[in-house]
Image (cartoon, rainbow, N blue to C red):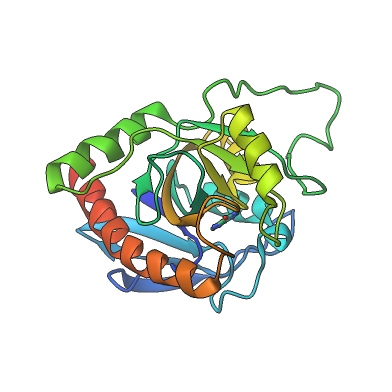
Amino acid sequence: MTDLAIIGGSGFSKLEELEITRREVIHTPYGEPSAPVAHGVFKNKKVAFLPRHGTAHTIPPHKVNYRANIWALKHIGAKRIVAIAAVGGIGADMAPGVIAIPDQIIDYTYCRDHTYFEHDLSQVTHIDFTHPYSESLRQNLIAVAKKVGIPVVDNGIYGATQGPRLETAMEINRMERDGCTLVGMTGMPETSLARELELEYACCAVVANWAAGRGDGPITMKEIEAHIGRGMEQVITLIAALLGSLK
Ligand code: HPA
């Protein structure tokens, strides 16, 4: 039984701290996941790791097979997922370098395979998605962050955009009016698919840049990579603390 599944985002294609015991290639009814699932041990807990963008970071957000990824994690017996994601900051408290644990999401994506409920339509299924993230997993992350002294913003409204292009300044203004405080390209349909399969799912969002129109000048990959690098070290500490807290 896996204690925790981790989906790694940009800048997090490997979890060096994981002592990998085996890699499992999983073929799903929905196609191939982004990579084999790496099973291993971290902090004496059984951890499964899946890099969302592939082992060599070659799969852009709109091409990720979210259904296969989440199905694969369910298949290996995972009950909880922490998804790591690089995001842009919209809210004033979401400056580059901040780590946030979002509590809400707004979906602006399109043309993504976004549900498992499309074959047996004898019974149409509408999952409850009022609170899209697992509140217990979120609170657990927030509590361990406090314990190990990693500052996190304990909320966030994640606006999930289609990508791979970044947004226009006006799109970000609109998203802010909608209430978004973070913007990223991978939050949906990953979050709702996890709910469809009844998995506990929380997101650890690393703010890599000010969203379009909010910083000085254009957004550069260099800026994004620099902040991700620093943020990910903290995320690893956070995950280690989370694993330590799991019964
Ligand atoms: N927009 C969308 N996705 C992102 C951003 C952004 O500004 N930064 C990192 N991922």
- Place of residue 217 in the rendered image (x, y in percent of width and height, measured from the top left): 56, 63
- Along the line of sight, the residue nearer the viewer: 208 or 1: 208
Task: Specify the quadrant that holds the C terminus.
Answer: top left
- Along the line of sight, the residue nearer the viewer: 210 or 59: 210
Question: Which residue is rendered at x = 65% and y = 52% of the image?
Answer: 66
Question: Which residue is rendered at x = 30% and y = 31% of the image?
Answer: 139
> In the displayed structure, does residue 120 sit left or right of residue 134?
right
Question: Which residue is rendered at x = 81% and y = 21% of the image?
Answer: 123
The reply to whether residue 109 is in sight is yes
- Place of residue 4 in the rendered image (x, y in percent of width and height, measured from the top left): 37, 49
> In the displayed structure, does residue 6 sit left or right of residue 145?
right
Count how many numbered circles sit on residues in the image: 0
Q: Is residue 94 above or below residue 13?
A: above
Residue that extends furthest to the front in the rendered view of this protein: 216
- Along the line of sight, the residue nearer the viewer: 111 or 98: 98
The reply to whether residue 1 is in sight is no
- Place of residue 232 in the rendered image (x, y in percent of width and height, measured from the top left): 34, 63
Q: Name the quadrant containing residue 80.
A: top left
Q: Is residue 235 above or below residue 13?
A: above
- Along the line of sight, the residue nearer the viewer: 23 or 9: 9
**Quarter of the rendered structure image containing ligand 1:** bottom right
Q: Is residue 240 above or below residue 147?
A: below
Question: Which residue is rendered at x = 70% and y = 44% of the image?
Answer: 170
> In the displayed structure, does residue 245 sit left or right of residue 186?
left
